[in-house]
Amino acid sequence: MHTLSLRELADGLAKARFSSEELTRHFLARIAAHNPALNAYITVLEEQALAGARAADKQRSSGDVHPLTGVPFAHKDIFCTEGVRTSCGSKMLDNFIAPYNATVVEKMAAAGMINLGKTNMDEFAMGSSNETSFYGPVRNPWDTNCVPGGSSGGSAAAVAAGLAPAATGTDTGGSIRQPSALCNLTGLKPTYGRVSRYGMIAFASSLDQAGPMARTAEDAALMLQVMAGFDEKDSTSIDCTVPDYSASLNNSVKGKVIGVPREFFAEGLSDAVASRTRAALSEYEKMGAVLKDISLPHSHLSIPCYYVIAPAEASTNLSRYDGVRYGHRCDNPLDLADLYTRTREEGFGDEVKRRILVGTYALSAGFYDAYYRKAQRIRRLIKNDFTEAFKSVDIIAGPTSPSPAFALGEKVDDPLTMYLEDMYTIAVNLAGVPALSIPAGMVDNKPIGLQLIGRDFAEADILNAAHQFQLQTDWHKQFAPAFA
Ligand code: GLN
């Protein structure tokens, strides 16, 4: 059952081929057997999931239900979940039991979906390898000596190893798409404002978006359908209608113009990934789409721009962890200053501290104009690049990540190299547009992703293009052999 897609599982439940309780027990047994090797889950909600599954079975037998009622999945441990530890991968929140549900958590529950547990992640979603988690690194099911990507690495590993059929993730600079690429999944970062951020622990508020991680575009469409929508509790949520994402999956891509930014095939991309990505792109030509050489001239500025804006926002967002209101508190503080400093010294890991230092510096009176204001101007130029490109193309496509999964420990001591992991994903967050990653083949026996970027609120278009690709290729059907 763990190799079936969400759509197939929903179908099986509808036809009573198995019950939600059987399904949930199956995934819980898989978690018990394989999580020790992967460390994909921080918290497993065994009793709660089984109770939910029994309730879902009852509901199903007594009438009309949401198609995903009784289907299990997992939540990244960044979403506040009432009565459940919500750690955000940090010692700071190791003892934090959320008093309320994030809107995304509410929506999945309202659809009757079964939350198997909370997945591991980089601390406060800062990272590209899942090595900054307080709960230890996650391993990639395709090669357990390698990282799964990050920061949603626990969600990616869980789905890739069949410890959940799908999961939620969040993406501030690539954290849904890059781990999806490294673990052979379909992962979508929606348009900024499409999915509510209420109850999602903040990293960089103008960039953070939640989205689905699944094996197929069909499944990502089903998940997004549940997650998306206006929420008055999130002041940046956008009130525009949510289309039926599954309805347009079968549209033809014939005649569609796909822009291929030359900057995405320049220095930094491994040759093998470049040629595999080009081969994947040629599938679209076979389907009648037109590939067009384009330029996103400010691409090279996206990483420096992000690494001013994201830490600046993080440094203010993380000021709330002061040992007073919730979370970790140091023992026997001498005075208030000691309480603040020792709590934060003990509660935060190195990468989080690095970001707070960089962010505070960039926002300080003497450097605000030179760094923060300059970065905001560059952000506008990056957005303009996309607006300009979308005047003549329907979709923009290229690699998701410059290389396949790398070894645990390989980049962890070299933050600048680690930051380059997101060289093709970060501009998308700065511009706010939607993008997804789909399985696009193997390099050194490890999966790589193809990234498809859409216009604002055109999630349906990129899901459609992704599904059409998956009708022509089998990459997304490949399952990590050691966990099949
Ligand atoms: N890897 C990037 C960072 O460390 C992006 C993380 C994310 O998208 N949450 O900030």
Image: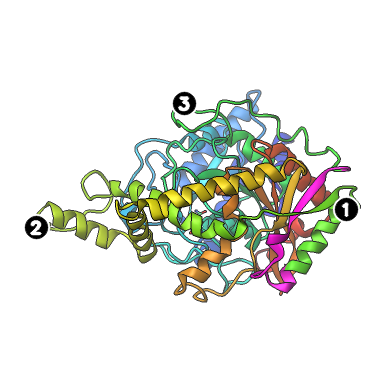
Of labels 1 and 3, earlier in sequence is: 3
Q: Can residue 154 be seen in this view?
A: yes
Res 285 label: 1
Of 380 and 282, the residue lying toward us? 380
The amino acid pointed to by label 3 is Glu
Element type at mark 1:
helix
The amino acid pointed to by label 2 is Leu
- Quarter location, residue 212: top right
Element type at mark 2:
loop
x%, y% of residue 288? 90, 47
Residue 258 within the magenta-colored segment of the rendering:
yes
In the depicted structure, whether residue 13 falls above or below residue 150: above
In 3D space, how far apart are the residues under numbered discs 2 and 3 (Cα atoms)? 42 Å
Dot 2 beta carbon under 8 Å from ligand 1? no
Residue 353 within the magenta-colored segment of the rendering:
no
Of 375 and 176, the residue lying toward us? 375
Of labels 2 and 3, earlier in sequence is: 3
The amino acid pointed to by label 1 is Glu
